[in-house]
Image: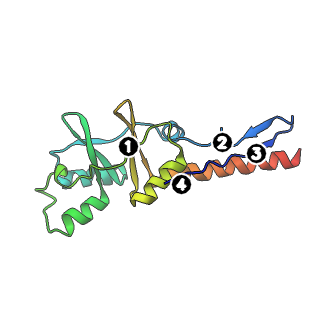
Amino acid sequence: MQFILISFCIFDKAHSPIDFQTIMKKVSNILTRKGSSVIAIDGSTTVLDALKLMSDKNIGSVVITEDGTYAGLLTERDYARKVILQGKSSLETQVREIMSTHFPRMIPENSVETCMHVMSENNIRYLPIFKDDELCGIVSISDVVRETILSHEETIEHLKSYIQS
């Protein structure tokens, strides 16, 4: 798959160019805004306890660790498909049995547009973010949409400023 980078510039009031490629939002912008702390539980935690935590924190996924290291994510989708539909018990099933482990790994330098593309192509709602092979955050589809809206609003303001000058 090939990507074509389209870049354009306009001139601000002082007639210096504004390159919109340089203001393209990155994953690091999302992590700065929302914070990079993640909620994590051990793989031996029961699904029921994980769901209670997710409900209490109003989150749709939780990081699963094994020996303190990132092992995967448990999502509401995992619960629906791997517990409810398979008739398993939430009281007895451990999260390591149903967690998702093959998420694409993103880095803070990736663009928000790249995340959007990866999420869309893989039909996923969460992406783990890694820096130097260490988990440094989780980005959700809501985070990506929110950042895209903010970016569009900033672009509109820049264009308005240019037109009014």
Verify CB contact (< 8 Å) between mark 2 and mark 4.
Answer: no
Task: From this view, report whether residue 78 is shown above or below residue 112.
Answer: below
Return the residue at label 3: 158
Ranked by sequence position, the earlier of labels 1 and 3 is 1
- Element marked by disc 2: loop
Task: From this view, report whether residue 138 is shown above or below residue 116.
Answer: above
The spot of residue 125 in percent (x, y) is 40, 56
How far apart marks 1 and 3 lie (CA) works out to 33 Å
How far apart marks 4 and 3 lie (CA) works out to 20 Å
Return the residue at label 4: 145
Ranked by sequence position, the earlier of labels 2 and 4 is 2
Q: Is residue 12 visible?
A: yes
- Would you call the spot at circle 1 few (<14 residues within 10 Å), some (14-19), or many (20 or more)? few
The spot of residue 134 in percent (x, y) is 34, 32
How far apart marks 1 and 2 lie (CA) works out to 23 Å
Q: Residue at x 20, y 67 (%)?
A: 84
Q: Residue at x 86, y 36 (%)?
A: 15
Return the residue at label 2: 21
- Element marked by disc 4: helix
Verify CB contact (< 8 Å) between mark 4 and mark 1.
Answer: no
